[in-house]
Amino acid sequence: MNYIHSRKTSIQLYAEYYTNNNNFGQYYEYQDSIKFYDEIEASSLYYTYEDILTGQIDVELELSPQDHVYHYTKDQILNLNLVLNYEFRPGSNVYVVYSVYRDVVGKQMNSFSDFLNYTPHDDTDLSEVNFTQSLFLKMDYWFDF
């Protein structure tokens, strides 16, 4: 969106909201000897890579989509930029840019307001929330030779 207030001032707003919720269903394990994928029950147990590295293979975990973020993506992103532009001289401008980025990974929200207000509830919630705000000042100046 672009709003021109006068010949010298304008306001631009850029907003992008993205949501993704993949659900691929059942787990499968490839059986190399018979070249076939066997279905694995969600209640099956498995070892993590870290357990094998540390030698703690007596620790077994239940399969969970939260442990496989790349296969069960739940992601929502908001990217917002607000630009104020003032032309103080022909061809020379001052820009003030306010930028907001918010990302929630690992949790599917039912509404936009839930997404904006979401915070992980406790230590067992494996979702991630990233939030950044930035303020920039840019100046263009054309020299007259």
Image (cartoon, rainbow, N blue to C red):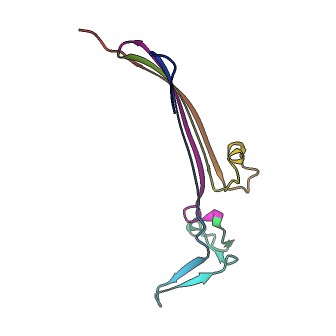
Dividing the picture into quadrants, the one containing residue 53 is bottom right
Give the residues drawn in magenta, as a range: 66-90
Q: Is residue 141 visible?
A: yes
The stretch drawn in magenta includes residue 75: yes
* Percent coordinates x, y for residue 117 in the rendering: 72, 43
What residue lies at 58% left-to-right and 36% top-to-bottom? 132
The one nearer the camera, 27 or 124, is: 27
Front-most of residues 34 and 21: 21
Where is residue 44 shown, x and y percent of the image? 67, 78
What residue occupies the far left of the structure in this picture? 145
**Predominant SS of the magenta segment:** strand
- Measured as percent of width and height from the top left, residue 99 is found at 54, 32
Residue 119 visible (yes or no): no
- In the depicted structure, whether residue 66 falls above or below residue 101: below
Q: Which quadrant holds the C terminus? A: top left
In the image shown, does 109 or 91 lie closer to the viewer? 91
Image location of residue 113, percent across then percent down: 71, 44
User: Which residue is depicted at the point 67% across and 56% down?
Assistant: 108
Decide if residue 119 is on the left or right side of residue 88.
right
- Relative to 77, is 142 above or below? above
For residue 5, above or below residue 63: above
Q: Above or below — where is 22 with respect to 140?
A: below
Specify the farthest residue to the bottom.
34
| Residue at x 59%, y 54% (from the top left corner) | 75
Q: Is residue 44 left or right of residue 83?
A: right
Furthest residue toward top:
145
Give left or right: position of 133 versus 143. right
Magenta stretch: includes residue 101: no
